Structures are given as structure tokens and as C-alpha cells.
Amino acid sequence: MKVWLWRALGLLFVGCAYIGAIVPGVPMTTFVILAAWAFAKSSPKLNHWLHTHPTFSPYLIRWEEKSIYPTKVKWIMLATMIGSYTFLLFTLWHKPATLIGIGGFMLFWLVWAWRYPGSEEEWKERKINGKKIGWFK
């Protein structure tokens, strides 16, 4: 039963990644990474499919090999969050606790994403200079 749960979760994440590939502002890379994580626990066949997918595999392989989270994706994430939060400020102005919670959640994901190198060049520079790649050395 556990395998089916992981597989279903992986398929859900793949569906979200497809939406992210089409709809601006919806993250694709994060969902691809999550799908690979779920498939690694449940289905070698689906994991292989994801790793050889023409759209998803470049992001996934860069993430797995060097923890590269593309800079373009980070900027899109930032712009989308600013737009969304601005909209929320006008619609939820009377619920400050909700705004603080959502803002904290968004800030967490922004900090998480920006800790990782955004390109091969940045990864090489960090490696040469002995800097952290992501959260760990």
C-alpha cells in the first residue's frame, strides 16, 4: 500500500509540473524534484521516465548532480510571490495573522531557493572558492 501512495503522490507532482510548464507563475522545477523523490521510493520505471523526459530531465539532473535551481525560476518565483502577496494585502487586509503566515511561508521558500546556485558557472565558482552549495557544504 505504501508503494501505491508514493506512486500516486509522484503522479500528482508530475501533473502539477505539467501545469507549471504551461501556466506562468506555477513552479515546475520544484514539482519535478518532488516527483522524482516520490518515484524513487515507489517506481524505478516512472523514475527512469522522469529522468529521460525531454522537458523535465535537464532540471532534474542538474538538481541531483549539483543542486542547481535555475536563476530564471527564482526570479519568476519572486515576481509571482510579490504579485500574489500584493493581491492578498488588498483582499485580506483585515486578517493580519493570515497575511503574516502566508508572508512567512513565501519568505521561507524564497530563502530556500536562493541559497542554491542558479547556473553551472555559479556552481563552479562556489565549488572553487569552497562556498556552500545550498544549505550544506
Image: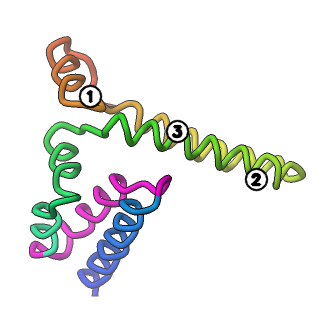
For the residue marked with disc 2, what is the amino acid? Thr
| In-image side of 74 versus 98 (left or right) | left
**Callout 3: SS:** helix
Residue 24 point in image, percent of width and height: 47, 55
Q: Are marks 1 and 3 in contact (CB under 8 Å)?
A: no
Residue at 27% in and 84% down: 4
Residue 17 point in image, percent of width and height: 35, 64
Q: Which residue is mark 3?
A: 78
Q: Point out the tag, 2 or 3, that comes first from the N-terminus.
A: 3
Q: Is residue 43 above or below residue 130?
A: below
Dominant secondary structure (helix, strand or loop) of the stretch shown in magenta: helix
The quarter of the picture where residue 21 lies is bottom left
For the residue marked with disc 1, what is the amino acid? Ile
Q: CA distance from mark 1 to mark 2?
A: 33 Å
The residue at the far right in this view is: 94
Residue 133's disc is 1
Q: Residues within 10 Å of mark 1 (few under 14, many from 20)?
A: some
For the residue marked with disc 3, what is the amino acid? Leu
Residue 111 point in image, percent of width and height: 48, 34
Q: CA distance from mark 1 to mark 3?
A: 20 Å
Q: Are marks 2 and 3 in contact (CB under 8 Å)?
A: no
The quarter of the picture where residue 49 lies is bottom left
Q: Residues within 10 Å of mark 2 (few under 14, many from 20)?
A: few
Q: Point out the tag, 1 or 3, that comes first from the N-terminus.
A: 3
| In-image side of 47 versus 5 (left or right) | left
Q: Is residue 112 magenta?
A: no
Q: Is residue 44 magenta?
A: yes
Provide the residue span drawn in magenta.
Answer: 24-45
Q: Which residue is mark 2?
A: 98
